[in-house]
Image (cartoon, rainbow, N blue to C red):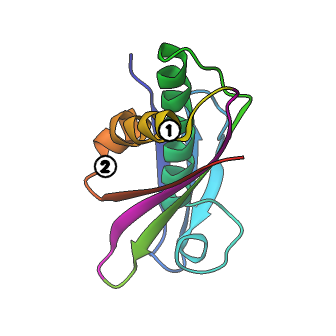
Amino acid sequence: MKRTANAVWNGSLKEGNGKITTQSAVLNNTKYDFNSRFGDGKSTNPDELLAAAHAGCFAMALSLILGQAGFTADSLDVTAVVTVNADKLEITESHLTLKAKIPGITKDKFMECANGAKDNCPVSKALSIKIALDAELV
């Protein structure tokens, strides 16, 4: 299975802009630019998309691991915060925060499953950065 996305950039780094389109067309000529990445612009940016990918992948991986252990979550609310060092132009960390409603699970089993998903979701495996996790049963 392969997934594709296309990015087109026009102009200089700070004054230019680009458009991103995904295979599914959920993003279709979606604008991104310097100000959205390094300022408070209102378009998307690669770091935000990476955070979305990591949060979504982690939630799906945890759902799989829970199912294999005999549990089904009522809800898995995941936020990923990707930290960028703008001076070095590098992504340094992805911090996952999970709030989960899972009937019948113990705290120990929950943490075992959550850590397994953190370590083994495909996006985590693709990243060569620190991955942190705060997990809470609610």
Which residue is at the front of the view, 84 or 29?
Answer: 84
Residue at 30%, 42% (x, y): give it. 126
Residue at 47%, 39% (x, y): give it. 108
Please provide percent x and percent y for residue 27.
65, 41
Mark 2 vs mark 1: in front: 1
Task: Pick out the residue farthest to the bottom.
Answer: 87
Give residue 10's mark: none
Secondary structure found at label 2:
loop
Q: Which residues are magenta?
A: 88-103
Please provide percent x and percent y for residue 7.
48, 48
Q: Quadrant of residue 122?
A: top left
Residue 101 lies in the magenta stretch: yes
Horizontal arrangement in the rendering, residue 100 relative to residue 55 (left or right): right
> Mark 1: which amino acid?
Phe
Please provide percent x and percent y for residue 82.
48, 63
Give residue 58's mark: 1
Whether 104 is drawn above or below 30: the answer is: above
Are there few (<14), some (14-19), or many (20+) residues within 10 Å of tag 1? many
Secondary structure found at label 1:
helix
**How many badges with numbers are in the image?**
2
Task: Provide the major secondary structure of the magenta segment.
Answer: strand
> Mark 2: which amino acid?
Leu
Please provide percent x and percent y for residue 77.
68, 44
Residue at 30%, 40% (x, y): give it. 125
Are there few (<14), some (14-19), or many (20+) residues within 10 Å of tag 2? some
Which residue is at the front of the view, 38 or 16?
Answer: 38
CA distance for labels 2 and 1: 13 Å
The residue tagged 2 is 127
Residue 46 lies in the magenta stretch: no
Query: In which quadrant is the N terminus drawn?
Result: top left
Task: Pick out the residue farthest to the left.
Answer: 128
Horizontal arrangement in the rendering, residue 134 relative to residue 131 (left or right): right
